[in-house]
Image (cartoon, rainbow, N blue to C red):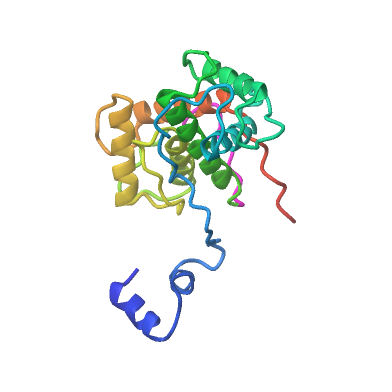
């Protein structure tokens, strides 16, 4: 995107989203929202326990109900009204068991932070799953090495997996799925390699492909990912 080109378009009266649509492909879906995911409230300062009340409790109840869509073992909280009920406690205990936290039903700072991070991950996953592009990840990684300038379906597959991984590992940045291995892809690959103790080459060779597939399969096996809607003919 040209910096001076955007200035010219802005001077013509185009808004930010209109400028983005001018530069990017017409089939790219751009949305705006007042609900900013990933920016979460900070820990309220004291543990939430049975009988606690307030907006912090309501926040946890709503987050747990959303997380449940991807982790069905977590019981639903039928009335997320801001009162820490026995149903809320039961949901918290199950969440703690699923994520290897002390299963005491108390939302201390560790449990609060884990709920927040998982909520952010599953909402990002839902966004990725609703982008309207269907991918199939095979049983075996591609027998190719991706480097700067690589193009095609193998790059798209890497970018798709990288974005799934990014939803659950904050150290790994997301990438644009455009089928072109660019500088931002290389930086993301290096962060992935750093996170999983691989040689930080910035290229996607056999070791990195194997780890990408292993991490992706781990996410698929442990997180319920609802099927993508059927695309119209």
Residue lying at 34% horizontally and 83% vertically, measured from the top left: 8
Q: Position of residue 173 (x, y in %)?
A: 36, 42
Query: As displayed, is residue 125 above or below residue 130?
Result: above
Residue drawn at the location 60% of the way across and 36% of the way down: 82
Q: Nearer the viewer, residue 183 or 59?
A: 59
> Residue placed at 70% from the left, 46% from the top?
229
Residue 49, position as x, y percentages in the image:
53, 22
Residue 136 place in picture, x, y as percent: 59, 38
Residue 129 to residue 9: above or below = above
Residue 135 inside the magenta-drawn segment: yes
Does residue 125 appear left or right of residue 69 in this picture?
Answer: left
Between 74 and 61, the one lying in front of the other is 61
Q: Is residue 187 magenta?
A: no
In the rendered view, tell whether residue 140 sits above or below residue 170.
above
Q: Which residues are magenta?
A: 132-141
Which of 207 and 227 lies nearest the eye of the viewer? 227
């Amino acid at each position: 995107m040209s910096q001076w080109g955007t200035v010219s378009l802005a001077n013509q009266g185009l808004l930010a989203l209109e400028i983005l649509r001018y530069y990017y492909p017409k089939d790219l879906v751009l949305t705006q929202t007042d609900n900013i995911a990933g920016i979460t409230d900070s820990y309220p300062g004291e543990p939430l326990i049975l009988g606690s009340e307030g907006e912090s409790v309501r926040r946890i109840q709503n987050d747990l109900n959303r997380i449940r869509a991807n982790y069905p073992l977590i019981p639903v909280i039928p009335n997320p009204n801001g009162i820490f009920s026995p149903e809320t406690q039961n949901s918290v205990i199950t969440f703690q068991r699923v994520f290897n936290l002390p299963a005491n039903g108390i939302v201390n700072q560790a449990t609060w932070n884990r709920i927040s991070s998982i909520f952010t991950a599953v909402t990002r996953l839902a966004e990725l799953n609703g982008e309207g592009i269907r991918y199939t990840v095979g049983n075996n990684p591609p027998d190719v090495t991706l480097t700067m300038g690589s193009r095609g379906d193998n790059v798209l597959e890497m970018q798709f997996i990288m974005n799934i991984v990014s939803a659950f590992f904050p150290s790994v940045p997301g990438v644009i799925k455009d089928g072109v291995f660019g500088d931002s892809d290389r930086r993301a690959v290096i962060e992935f390699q750093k996170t999983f103790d691989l040689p930080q080459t910035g290229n996607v060779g056999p070791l990195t492909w194997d780890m990408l597939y292993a991490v992706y399969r781990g996410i698929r096996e442990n997180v319920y990912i609802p099927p993508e809607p059927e695309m119209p003919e």
